[in-house]
Amino acid sequence: MQTENIVSATEFCKHNNIEINFIITLHASSLIELIKIKEEVFIPESQLKIIEKILRLQHDLDINSEGIEAITYLLQRMQEMQNQLLLLNNKLRMYEEN
Amino acid sequence: MEFIDYYKILGVDKLATEAEIKKAYRKLARKLHPDLNPNDKNAESEFKKINEANEVLSDPEKRKKYDEHGKDWQHAEEFKKQQQNRQGARNSNESQFYENDQGDFSSFFDSMFSGSRRTNQTKFRGQDYNAELNLKLIDALITHQQTLTVNGKNIRITIPAGIENGQIIKLKNYGAPGANGGPSGDLYITFNVANHSQYKRLGNDLYTSAEIDLYTAILGGETIIETLTGKIKMKVSPETQYGTKIRLKGKGFPIYKKEGENGDLYVTYQIKLPINLNEEQIKLFTELSNIK
């Protein structure tokens, strides 16, 4: 069975000077996953990187949560397209040198 | 070290207001931010420039100093004083968002403003690094170790057999150090696996061609086929046609992170016709031709 470390959302918010509501909003927008244990909210370790990226976008670019949602969706699509491009390039390489 | 025109970088006038500078910075940052341009080294480098320009021009004190000493910074008294302190400042453990070992600020910035960087109370994870590693096809055949130098640090990594061209692996916490006590970023290594003159790879399968002589093709027999791991003897069926493709199960490329499992090897037969026939051979071929 795979296990994952979790971080208390309250602690994380305290650490990063952000409101817990911000994390809840990200969860409501399906941008991150959260775990609730006995009414306390926890952040899985895998989600920390996503939250930190969102914080950077907010901090550096002054982008609101709707904008971040749109950016995240577009970045995901871009990643999928890049993977597809890589796959096609590798296929093409096979014929190019024949 | 050259003079850096921060106004030009942000595309604003020397008399630009704080609001105009902020607007210009935001506009460029939204275009060049590393999070919006993953794996784009050019965007990352441009972002560092605008970040530095904004760092100076958005701070009234730094802007004043820059405007006063700007082009003549090399002769500025303050510069000399700071240069003496520079070594000490460099040795400090100060860490900034987007800073890496090579530094996110130019030496021009360091000379004018060393030790005066804005402090940020928010903890940030360090920036991710990207590196590329070139491998021969044969190198990707077995799990092996290699030493990489990334930003001056030697990192020994294990490369699993079956790694694909363009595949990216992540080494956690091998990126830039975090800011204000935040965790380090990650290192992403992109593998460039070169083609092989004799074998083509598609996923886990390998494709190659083998020559058989006319007589073996017609009458059947045996042929030796070279695989990436050695030679194998194959039976050739009678009346094998030119371009016949055979599959050698499990003789292809190792499957990534599945020890002992391999793809298949596809061999296309090419029939080599005899040349410089002697009289007897010509006679026999003519007889054969007449029989048909």
Image: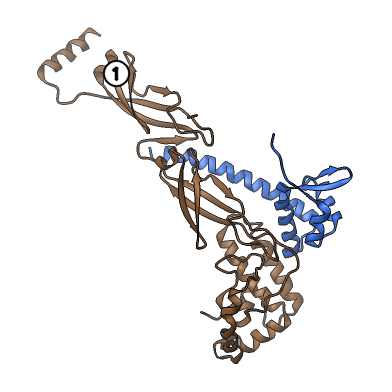
**How far across and down, in percent of the image, does residue B24 sit?**
70, 71
Left or right of residue B155, residue B219 in this image: left
| Nearer to us in this view, B207 or B234 | B234
The image quadrant of residue B27 is: bottom right
Q: Residue at x 73, y 72 (%)?
A: B22
Number of numbered tags placed on the structure image: 1
Rendered residue at 56%/62% (across/down): B42
Residue A35 is at least partly visible in this image:
yes
Q: Please provide percent x and percent y for residue A9.
A: 81, 52
Please give the letter of the chain rendered in blue.
A
Chain B, which colour?
Answer: brown
Figure check: B87 above or below A79? below
Q: Quadrant of residue B63?
A: bottom right
Asked if residue B137 lies left or right of residue B11, the reply is left
Residue located farthest toward the left when viewing the structure as drawn:
B279
Estimate how packed mark 1 is, as few (under 14), some (14 to 19) or many (20 or more) residues with alpha carbons within 10 Å: few
Expressed as whole percent of the image width and height from the top left, the position of residue B187 reads 58, 54
Secondary structure category for the residue under label 1: strand
Determine the chain carrying the residue at label 1. Answer: B
Q: Position of residue A75 (x, y in %)?
A: 67, 50
The residue carrying mark 1 is: B222
Q: Nearer the viewer, residue B272 or B171?
A: B171
The front one of A71 and B289 is: A71
